[in-house]
Image (cartoon, rainbow, N blue to C red):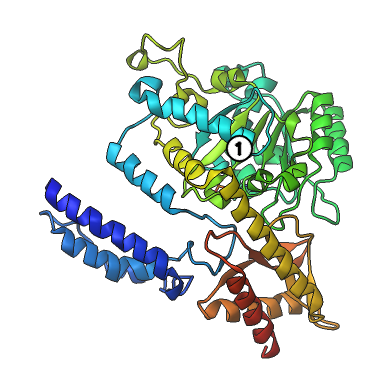
Amino acid sequence: MNNEEFRRYGHDFIDWVADYFEQVEEYPVCSTVKPGEIKSALPAKPPVGGEPMKNIFADFQEIIMPGITHWQHPGWFAYFPANNSPASVLAELLTAGLGAQCMIWQTSPAATELEEVVMQWLGKMIGLPENISGVIQDTASTATLCALLTAREKATGFNSNRSGARLPLCVYASEEGHSSIDKAVKIAGYGIESLRHIPTDHNFALSAEELEKAIAEDKSRGLIPACVIGTLGTTSSAAVDPLAEIGEICRRHDLWFHVDAAYGGTAALLDEKRKVLEGAEMFDSFVFNPHKWMLTNFDCSAYFVKDEELLIRTFEIHPEYLKTGRDEEVKNYRDWGVQLGRRFRALKLWFVIRSYGVKGLQEIVREHLRLAGLFKEWVEEDSRFALLAPVNFSLVCFRLTKEGASEEELARLNAALLEKVNATGEVFMTHTSLKGRYAIRMAIGQRTTTEKHVRRAWDLISQSALTL
Ligand SMILES: *Cc1c(COP(=O)(O)O)cnc(C)c1O
């Protein structure tokens, strides 16, 4: 492809994306293809000669598009959002065009220094303490892995890096903690048997009392507590663990305190929600995902640490071929996580924050919270339905009830309701289980979702429930 052609298709593709933004609502939210359908439409062998872009793009539209699930659809209420924005998409285009690999300062000084600055902005925007350091990771899963690796090194005096993990270390998280914690505990060498799933209270928040008990028990058995992970906005129901109490326990026992705020952290943009961070200032590490609910397209996960020295000591490497004369003066983010090569992710975050302004972002998040409040009221006002968890942010967990029905019957009934509503293609919701109870999750957070879409979702639910 020559540059002229690139220019022409570039313009066409931007038009295509702009049209997509306008028309995304016309697609069924969730792709309806069957397993294997896309694969069977693709040739088994790659082309030997180059093909014209016209053909490639035609296949993109005909073969690929039907297999896309539309996360940017305003009827997206599944999982958590992964919203994007025009500013973010344009920044990603520039990032791709530059094609810079930003592993160290020298390989693009602007990438490193912009990352430092936007991470400081972000920390201030959600009210984190001063004097913290930030780094962008690909996902919250990776950030939590980094936290557990740093906690492991701290607890073993940096001996695990040297001679392998040998000490019987323990990790604590609520039973509602994200599955990425289990994964990280396994791959960081703690062993999954060392993870304590601490029971939760009636609000699905970790019980500090149970945490204290578990730590004491492990200590009495000669085990070594190393890390507690508190969640601000659990994945099932957006519960908030008692961070201040957990922080206090961590301080008393000298444990690493990691806060997983992957989804909920965005709410701290709002002064009126800032109180959810109470106690989070005691964290050793903190993660939240601008790629979930802050208009920055996937991937962009903000990882903050109190003591960057511990993080760097855990990850640093000094091969001769990466040495530069500047290493004393600058940050080399290759030493701040697992990967060596790094994408220029700070650019899209910078574009998003500048394009919307703090106020613009706050307004969008505030509106999502208002819509969740409305939806919650509709659930409460309809005696056929029950709310299953407190609505702390923009997630509502509820279900259809039925006099005298068993848990299994209710699960079947609500799964049928969910399937019926999703089959309309107008909305997409998912489910979870809360202390054994099947719950439908209504997660509001798509950039273009308005009251009309939330109202439509409720109408679909409430009408479908009549005919089950
Ligand atoms: C979504 C989520 C994660 C995982 O996020 P990734 O960035 O996809 O790894 C972790 N923790 C919580 C609480 C989440 O909601």
Q: Residue at x 45, y 66 (%)?
A: 69
Assign a secondary structure to mark 1: helix
Residue 73: % across, % down: 49, 66
Tell which of 151 and 456 is nearer to you: 456
Taking the image as shown, residue 464 lies to the left or right of residue 45, namely right
Tell which of 33 and 84 is nearer to you: 84
Taking the image as shown, residue 275 lies to the left or right of residue 178, namely right
Residue 223 to residue 51: above or below:
above
Q: Residue at x 65, y 49 (%)?
A: 178
Q: Is mark 1 within 8 Å of ligand 1?
A: yes
Query: Is residue 284 in view?
Result: yes
Residue 380: % across, % down: 80, 73
Residue type at tag 1: Thr
Taking the image as shown, residue 384 lies to the left or right of residue 423, namely right
Quadrant of image for the C terminus: bottom right
Residue 425 to residue 311: above or below:
below
* Residue at the spot of label 1: 144
Residue 203 to residue 254: above or below:
below
Tell which of 140 and 159 is nearer to you: 140
Tell which of 314 and 462 is nearer to you: 462
Report the label total.
1
Residue 174: % across, % down: 76, 46
Residue 213: % across, % down: 88, 37
Q: Residue at x 10, y 54 (%)?
A: 49
Determine crowd level at label 1: few under 14, some 14-19, many 20+ residues with C-alpha closer than 10 A. many
Q: Residue at x 56, y 65 (%)?
A: 449
Residue 160, image quadrant: top right
Query: Is residue 43 in view?
Result: no
